[in-house]
Amino acid sequence: MNNKKLLEKAAEIHGIKGQWWELSKWQNLQGRKWKVGDGPRILAGHELVYGTHNTKPWNPLKNGKDAFELAVQHDVFTTHIQTFHKHMAAASKVSSISKEEALCRAIVQTVVEQASIDVSTIEKAPY
């Protein structure tokens, strides 16, 4: 599952009704992120963010606060610790991401996996 789908699924599970927003990225003449007072600005591209509003992005794959909130709300470190360890081990092997990103990814994957297991058990329950 790619990052976009993983993020959308985690938001749905967490109860966030978000959408994708395309934001312009600006830089000053020295090539740094533009701030008020920097003088002229140059369009440096666009960035997609997910959230309830373009000023309120929600991304537990990149933001430790969002990931920790997700983990606490969905009992990742208590009830689902085995699944979390499995995902953490896999994410830690990816050399292109930091330890924090690996932790965030493991949390999101655990929540999404546990939610799909819970749904499939409910669907298979005989009534």
Image (cartoon, rainbow, N blue to C red):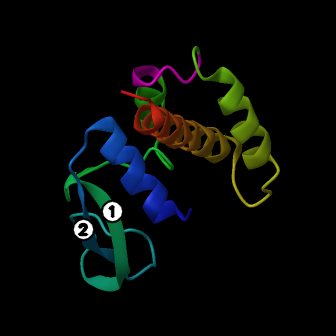
Vertically, is 15 above or below 61? Answer: above
The circle on residue 21 is 2
Q: Is residue 74 magenta?
A: yes
Q: Which residues are magenta?
A: 72-77
Residue 58 image offset from top left, x and y in percent:
33, 48
Residue for badge 1: 49
Residue 34 has which mark? none
* Side of 3 where 40 appears, left or right: left
Q: Position of residue 99 (x, y in %)?
A: 70, 42
Q: Can you see residue 64?
A: no
The spot of residue 1 in percent (x, y) is: 56, 62
Q: Residues within 10 Å of mark 2 (few under 14, many from 20)?
A: some
Front-lying residue, 123 or 44: 123
Q: Nearer the viewer, residue 44 or 21?
A: 21
- What residue do we see at 24% from left, 68% from top? 21
Asked whether the beta carbons under mark 1 and mark 2 sit within 8 Å of each other, the answer is yes
Residue appearing at x 40%, y 28% in the figure: 69
Q: Amino acid at mark 1?
A: Val
